[in-house]
Amino acid sequence: MIKKTFIFLVLVVFLLAPVFVLNTYAQGGQVNGVGNITQGITKGIQNPLGSENQTLIALIGNLLKLAAQIGAVVCVFFIIYSGFLFIKAQGEPAELTKAKSVFFWSIIGAGILLGASVIADLISGTVNSVLK
C-alpha cells in the first residue's frame, strides 16, 4: 500500500511540475536567438492566489480554481490508470470488475469536480449581484 501511494505521489508531482515551471517562464520569459530564456528567471514565480484581488471571496474563488485544476489532473490520471487495468485484466472477470469500478468512480469524480466549479460560479455570481 505504501509503495502504491508513493508511486501515485511521484506521478502527480511529475504531472504537475511542468505546469508550474512553464507558467513561471510564460509570464514574461522570452527566448533569444540561441534558445535561452532571458527574462523568465528574473520575473520570479507569480502568486497563484492573485495579488490584485484582496477580498475573501476572491481568495476562496482562486483556491477553488486551483483545487479544480489539480483535481482535473488527478481525474485524467485515474482514467488512464483504469485503461491500464482494462488491458491488464485480459478478460478475467474479477480484474474487469476492478477496472470498471476505477473508471466509473473517476468519471463520477470528474462530474463532481465540474459540478462543484459550476455551482461555485453560480453562487459567486449571485453574491456579487446582491452586493452591488
Image (cartoon, rainbow, N blue to C red):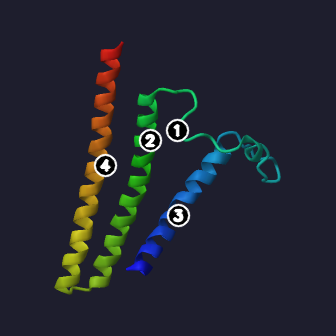
Q: Are marks 4 and 1 in contact (CB under 8 Å)?
A: no
Q: Going by the image, does 18 lie left or right of 59?
A: right
Residue at screen point 77% across, 43% down: 42
Residue at image mark 3: 13
Specify the amino acid type for callout 3: Val
Seen from the viewer's position, the closer of residues 35 and 25 is 25
Label 2: few (<14), some (14–19) or many (≥20) C-alpha neighbours in 10 Å:
some
Q: At which x and y percent is residue 125? A: 32, 25
Residue at image mark 4: 113
Specify the farthest residue to the front.
56
Disc with the residue nearer the chain's start (2 vs 1): 1
How much space separates mark 4 and mark 1, taking CA atoms? 19 Å
Specify the amino acid type for callout 1: Leu
Disc with the residue nearer the chain's start (4 vs 1): 1
Residue at image mark 2: 63
How much space separates mark 3 and mark 2, taking CA atoms? 19 Å
Seen from the viewer's position, the closer of residues 53 and 32 is 53
Residue at image mark 1: 49
